[in-house]
Image (cartoon, helix red, strand yellow):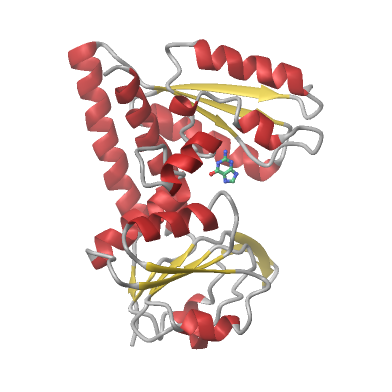
Amino acid sequence: MTAKRIDGKAFAATVRGQVAEHVARLKAERDLVPGLAVVLVGEDPASEVYVRNKGKQTLEVGMNSYEHKLPADTAEADLLALIARLNADPAVHGILVQLPLPGHLNSDLVINAIDPAKDVDGFHISNVGLLGTGQKSMVPCTPLGCLMMLRDHLGSLSGKNAVVVGRSNIVGKPMAQLLLNDSCTVTIAHSRTADLPAVCRGADILIAAVGRPEMIPGDWVKPGATVIDVGINRVERDGKMRLVGDVDFASASAVAGAITPVPGGVGPMTIACLLANTLTACCRANG
Ligand code: GUN
């Protein structure tokens, strides 16, 4: 069997098009322009690339983009003061603080200082609690993008066995919660899981979010399963730097029913969902 490639790049372009149409209507009918503030502390090169892409795509859908680049040695009080200003600014509907933060800053404290209604990452403890109890919340962008691709490919997810490999707060845990809310039977697997290959082989839906290059081979995949590869790992191959996922694409695509490629799968969907969340936050703030 050769798996269907789930084209996240094309799907993300469709989502961005829908967001852009809605943004244009808001502007024309209500003179309202959604605004996204992105805060980057320090000079991590990968984070700088993400932040640049976010800013570019925010402008492309017609929203306002506000970038705040702070030095790596920024004091926590100064970062909290910036967040307080952004919370109070009516032109800012979404706030994203790029993670990871430098070690001297308390990420939990910083994230929980964001107004939950502007927390377009869905990381604030209030949003985590709302999602965990199935209430209306801001949903973290990467898991939301994965869920959209799964629903698009499978229709109803009800009753499917879903295995999420990875237990991070950014992807693994909220992904499991979303799948549970869609009536999947969910297992969260991680580095201490006993017989991980057997657990993965039980998955109708396999989500790989561990950050280890190509650690999941095809013989861990149930024939016909839907595989979502969240990993974005930079590796050197034949003297060149390449991006690979957490799944060994060549062997897994011979077994799976459908699979997301890296690059061009989950990655583009994450930013598209960030824009969708910013639009949602703007609409909620303005009735
Ligand atoms: N760093 C890596 N992924 C993310 C994300 O989704 N949001 C934020 N704020 N930082 C990240």
Q: Position of residue 134 (x, y in %)?
A: 36, 47
Q: Residue at x 56, y 84 (%)?
A: 197
Q: Residue at x 42, y 59 (%)?
A: 265
Q: Residue at x 69, y 36 (%)?
A: 107
Depth check, front residue: 23 or 59: 23
Q: Position of residue 275 (x, y in %)?
A: 39, 35
Q: Position of residue 143 (x, y in %)?
A: 44, 52
Q: Is residue 251 visible to the viewer in this orientation of the structure?
A: no
Q: Is residue 33 visible to the viewer in this orientation of the structure?
A: yes
Please determine whether, in this image, residue 200 is positioned above or below residue 50.
below
Q: Is residue 279 left or right of residue 110?
A: left
Q: Quadrant of ligand 1?
A: top right
Depth check, front residue: 107 or 177: 177
| Residue lying furthest front | 133
Q: Position of residue 105 (x, y in %)?
A: 76, 32
Check the picture and name the quadrant holding the N terminus. bottom left
**Which image quarter: residue 84?**
top right
Q: Residue at x 58, y 64 (%)?
A: 166
Please determine whether, in this image, residue 250 is positioned above or below residue 101.
below
Check the picture and name the quadrant holding the C terminus. top left
Q: Is residue 66 left or right of residue 7?
A: right
